[in-house]
Amino acid sequence: MTEKRSSFTGKIGFVLAAAGSAVGLGNIWRFPYLAAKYGGGIFLLVYLILAVTFGFALMCAEIAIGRKTGQSAINAFKSLDKRFGFVGVIAAIIPAIILPYYSVIGGWVTKYFYAFVSGDAAASASDSYFTGFIAKPFEPIGWFLIFMGLTALIVLFGVEKGIEKVSKVMMPVLVVLTLFIAGYSMTIDGALEGVKYYLLPDFSRFSATTVLAAMGQLFYSMSLAMGIMITYGSYMKKDVVLEKSVRQIEIFDTGIAFLAGMMIIPAVFAFSGGDETALGKGPSLMFITLPKVFNSMPAGAVIGAIFFLLVLFAALTSSISLMETVVSIVRDKLGWNRRVTCIVVFAFCVILGIPSSLGFGIWDFVSVAGLSILDMFDFVSNSVLMPIVALLTCIFVGYIIKPQALIEEIEIGAPFKAKTLFTVVIKYVAPVCIVLILISSILDVLGIMKI
Ligand code: PHE
């Protein structure tokens, strides 16, 4: 490519764009349901520990690889060492797996926004509303197509900048609103049990599966282990202090996830009367619980509508970054123009997304180990491919190019305070943990032993 790569303007530009990619459904929809399912406090604790160690080190590494090489994922690995080009290729497959099912959930959010503005707020608080909706064959697909189409149009016309500007205003509002809803949730009768469940770790619930789930969530939420941060790093100017930017993105991303859990988990307890099975609702948790919260609060219909609109924006900035990545990889490899590529990627996503959507309705008989079709895509990307890419990235940085090569890049502009942590995590802690976790989860899935 002879085209010059553009840079993010201003110091804050990079952080905002990366945070736009990071903060999305992963924080608001995925984190709370995983925390609810995997033991609450213990999941939160494991997640936080992983975020300040793995998450921090891996994000520094990816952004530094991108900035050092000025290339997107596939070429970045190749240009540093020919033998490792394949890591970039695996990384590149991940966004293509995530985007279709991400857009199915994006469609659900769009539907709920519509339900709240069209006067269906009270109805949506009933138990059967969500299950009735996702069981329908066509309606969820329609909303999925609307969300996917919106994403594709934005990418096609290259108007991400406009969206980023809007979301710059929307994100802080989302934080404030989430804080408010979380505060309200805690005051509902019976919610206190949920606050305890969410904040106090129960060590007897600790298992390899908890760690794997937390790790997959960490990569997903911070847009790591799939080449995206490498690409973003390639646009980052040399005068931006890398370590500080990473900290800011991390705090923002983790903060929103934490608040989302606070908003949803206590409410689950309040509305289910302590029935623990309500915690295992999986992907549907947010859509079942939040309408009940809104229904119980004054002006809930208006607050709910605003909330779903903000979540829709957060989801769009993430789906745009997913689609942009897929589009730019296809264009780099095949040399197609932007329009053709967007249409082909859109068609591909529709084909992969429809089964995910039908998996909760007429195709709900398709299930492996209790996972729906959507969950399976989610599992393959988050619990299999991402840990593998993360492991290979650590080996690559730790033993092939050596941490020092990236430390030099990170130190441009300011000393790297967490240098030792970075080196130890990348070289020893992360690879060993990822291997152990992968092995134990494979054994677990095969039913050989339960750890
Ligand atoms: N990080 C985004 C979220 O939390 C999801 C995402 C993953 C976006 C990968 C881009 C790339 O919702």
Image (cartoon, rainbow, N blue to C red):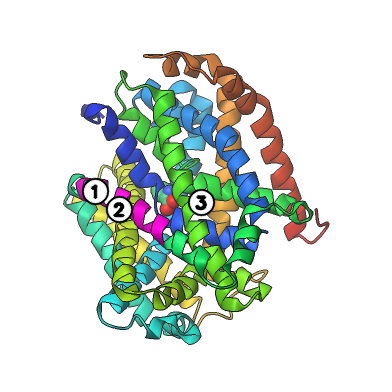
Could you tell me how far apart the alpha carbons at marks 1 and 2 are, in whole angstroms?
7 Å
Q: Are marks 1 and 2 in contact (CB under 8 Å)?
A: yes
- Secondary element under disc 2, as helix, strand or loop, is helix
Q: Residue at x 39, y 14 (%)?
A: 412
In the rendered image, residue 73, in percent from the top left (x then y), is placed at 41, 35
Picture layout, residue 378 above or below residue 144? above
Q: Amino acid at mark 2?
A: Val
Packing grade of label 1 (10 A; few <14, some 14-19, many >=20) is few
Magenta segment, prevailing SS (helix, strand or loop): helix
Q: Residue at x 77, y 54 (%)?
A: 443
Q: In the picture provided, is 144 more to the left or to the right than 45?
A: left
In the rendered image, residue 245, in percent from the top left (x then y), is placed at 39, 29
Q: Residue at x 37, y 64 (%)?
A: 106
Task: Using the rendered view, name the quadrant where residue 305 is placed.
Answer: bottom left
Asked if the stretch drawn in magenta spans residue 178, the answer is yes
Q: In the picture provided, is 349 more to the left or to the right than 60?
A: left
In the rendered image, residue 279, in percent from the top left (x then y), is placed at 62, 69
Residue of label 2: 173
Packing grade of label 3 (10 A; few <14, some 14-19, many >=20) is many
The first of marks 1 and 3 along the sequence is 1
- Which residues, given as a range, are shown in magenta? 163-180
Residue 169 disc label: 1
The first of marks 3 and 2 along the sequence is 2
Q: Amino acid at mark 1?
A: Val
Could you tell me how far apart the alpha carbons at marks 1 and 3 are, in whole angstroms?
21 Å
Nearest to the observer: residue 181 or residue 392: 181
Q: In the picture provided, is 145 more to the left or to the right than 199?
A: left
Residue of label 3: 258
Q: Amino acid at mark 3?
A: Phe
